[in-house]
Amino acid sequence: MEIPKQVQNILQRLEKAGYEAYVVGGCVRDLLLLASLGRATNAAHANVRMNPNDWDVTTNARPEEITKVFPDSKYENEFGTVLIKIAEDEREDGLKYVEVTTYRSEQGYSDRRHPDEVQFENSLDKDLERRDFTINALALGASSKFQAPNSREIINPEIKIPKGWKLVDLFGGLKDIDKKIVRAVGEPSDRFKEDALRMMRAVRFAVQLNFEIEPKTERAIVKLAGAIKFVSQERIHDELIKILQSDYPADGILLLYKTKLLRYIIPELEQGVGVAQNKHHPYPVFKHAVESLRHTKNKDYQVRLASLLHDVAKPKVKEGMGEDATFYNHEYAGAKMAKRIMERLKFSREDINRVTNLVRNHMFYYNVDEVTAASVRRLINKVGRENLQDLIDLRVADRLGSGTPKAMPYKLRHLQYMMKKVQNDPVSVKMLKINGDELMPLLNIKPGPKIGAMLDVLLAEVIEEPELNEKEHLEKRSRELNKMDLDELCAKAKKVIEGRREKDEENMKGEFWVK
């Protein structure tokens, strides 16, 4: 691991102009993690990946002084951050820009998010003491102007940095990296009162790096957990995604629960704590959700979120007690709840549609002896071809999250075989060998809902018998359907589609012990 030459050049130009300059924060932390400082590595260290644009520089130069050294830079904020663009012919490893920020201190956080006052400082120690965690309060540079007792020269062949550079560590961040600890800088309560999102960031760093939260820091989170309400949902959304994308997402959810943060972020999940299920599920609802997430091999955060939320409605729809309890329609109620949760957390429409689709259909029926190629085509039509593998991944996670030792039973392997077998069969209106533009002149009718209803009937019939997807047959059949009035045609389309769906769902309910 080495510091990019472009970053080194920025520091050198600032120093040549008479200013101090250091790389600082998360980039230094990750640099040290990757090199492991000559000590034994662990799995989390090996999984650290530097974002090529995550190199931050701090300096005692004021913003207007920075822009004089770098005339092409941009300064359009009140926090002293200047954006220095890397020329295209000088870019390496995807590095497009570097943020250079003036040393600063911050006072007053009346909204528990933004400082009421930002004050530029002349000393590096003032800048480092405002940072969130010790592992992020590290600076690396060659400036001789700042002298600190807790600075040391790094001698490690795995870290390729210019000779003479030193690490400035005023708060024991190096030791905490070695001990795998997330510890707040100074008094934890003060740091969290400044920005309540830092509590959630502590959880995120713990699961990203496979670290533990230091006890005093954790107690402060528990005490101040309610302050997360003052943080925008957009910022919470971003941290939640990072937790879900980590190597230990289930541990992240458990940490959010342990620190009382979960009740303010996704309180619906906590409603499943201690709620027993039936003979098919040895774990209570909340534990099953977390274990399902733990066993989700799919790396997409949308699929992982679907695993976490797939049974979120069970506490609301539960009927009966003991091993014969039922959870009728929990998948549909769960999809509605997941939609509300994700809307509240400002997820995109695309994310919401994908997750709710998986939650709604996670109990799809598949029995090798009973399911036909037509039912597989109906399933593809219902959930979308692009979502089927995600749905299987969710089913596998659901099984393993229930303590079932066999992740991929024969019937799921058979489903994958059938999916491949019917992959070229028509499963959507777009795959019919006739379309609305062709129907209108053929039948001498104008655009309208009758065209859509007619195509729905044709698709329903073709799903059952793919060989019917021939233009000559479809033209003949459309002439027959055109003799029906619109209400009759809509009723027929609904009858064909819903009738098959009801049969599939009855089979599904029997398999999953619901009424």
Image (cartoon, helix red, strand yellow):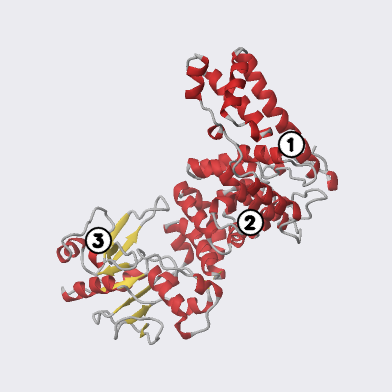
Number of the label disc, if any, that sits on residue 505: 1
Residue type marked 1:
Glu
Residue 121 lies, in percent from the top left, at 26, 67
Q: Which marked residue is nearer to the observer: mark 1 or mark 3? A: 1
In the image, residue 60 above or below residue 319: below
Q: Residue at x 57, y 40 (%)?
A: 339
Marks 1 and 3, Cα distance to the nearest angstrom?
Answer: 57 Å
Q: Earlier in the sequence, mark 2 or mark 1?
A: 2
Residue type marked 2:
Leu
- Decide if residue 65 is in sight here: yes
The quarter in which the C terminus is drawn is top right
Q: Could you say which is closer to the camera, residue 458 or residue 137?
A: 458
In the image, residue 316 above or below residue 247: above
- Asked whether disc 3 touches disc 2, contact meaning CB atoms under 8 Å apart, the reply is no
- Decide if residue 333 is in sight here: no
Q: Earlier in the sequence, mark 3 or mark 2?
A: 3
Q: Write down the residue under mark 2.
A: 293
Q: Residue at x 47, y 53 (%)?
A: 238
Q: Earlier in the sequence, mark 1 or mark 3?
A: 3
Marks 3 and 2, Cα distance to the nearest angstrom?
Answer: 40 Å
SS for dot 2? helix
SS for dot 1? helix
Q: Write down the residue under mark 3.
A: 85
Picture quadrant of residue 60: bottom left
The quarter in which the N terminus is drawn is bottom left
Question: Within 10 angstroms of label 1, few (less than 14), some, or many (20 or more) residues?
Answer: some
Q: Which marked residue is nearer to the observer: mark 2 or mark 1? A: 1
SS for dot 3? strand
Residue 111 lies, in percent from the top left, at 41, 50
